[in-house]
Image (cartoon, rainbow, N blue to C red):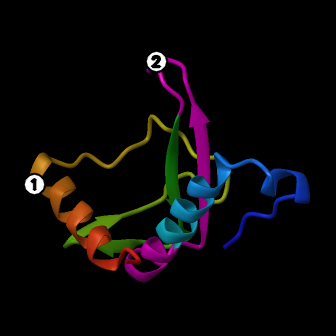
Amino acid sequence: MTWRYSTEMRKWVFIRPILRVTADLEAALAATFAPDKINYLMLMMSDPHVHFHVLPRYAGERSIAGMNFVDRAWPVAPSVADVTDTGEAERAAIADTLRGAWAR
C-alpha cells in the first residue's frame, strides 16, 4: 500500500475501510492495468457527496478488456476532461476485468 499515515490517523475508525479499499484497488489495478502511478482526487463540486476519482497513470499505452488507453497528460497533472470515449459495454467489460482481479 502506498499511503503513509500517522499514529493519530490510525485512531480514526472511518479511515480503515478507505485504506482497505485503496489497497485492494491498487492491487487490482496493478494486476490488470499496470499503472506507473495512481492519482486520487477527492471532490465534491457537483455531486452532493464526497467521492474519490481514481486515475491510473502510465507513460506508455495500456490495454484492458480489449481497449487501448493513452495517458496524454503523462507525466503532468491529469485532466479529468480528457477521457477515453467508451460505451456501456466497454465500461462493463473493464469493470468485470477489475472485479476479477479484486482481492477477496
Question: What is the span of residues highlighted in magenta in the rendered image?
Answer: 27-50
- Residue 53: image location, x then y, percent: 50, 44
Instruction: Tell me which residue sits at (59%, 73%) in the image.
Output: 36
Q: Which labelled disc corresponds to residue 33?
A: none
Q: Are marks 1 and 2 in contact (CB under 8 Å)?
A: no
- Residue 76, image x, y percentages: 67, 51
The label shown at residue 89 is 1
| Residue type of the residue flagged with mark 1 | Ala
Observer able to see residue 84: yes
Q: Which amino acid type is marked by label 2? A: Pro
> Which element type, helix, strand or loop, lies under badge 1?
helix
What x and y, as percent, mark residue 41?
60, 42
Quadrant the N terminus occupies: bottom right
Q: Give the secondary structure at mark 2.
A: loop
Q: Give the residue number, with chain letter if any, for mark 2.
A: 48
Nearer to us in this view, 20 or 68: 20
User: In which quarter of the view is residue 7 placed?
Assistant: bottom right
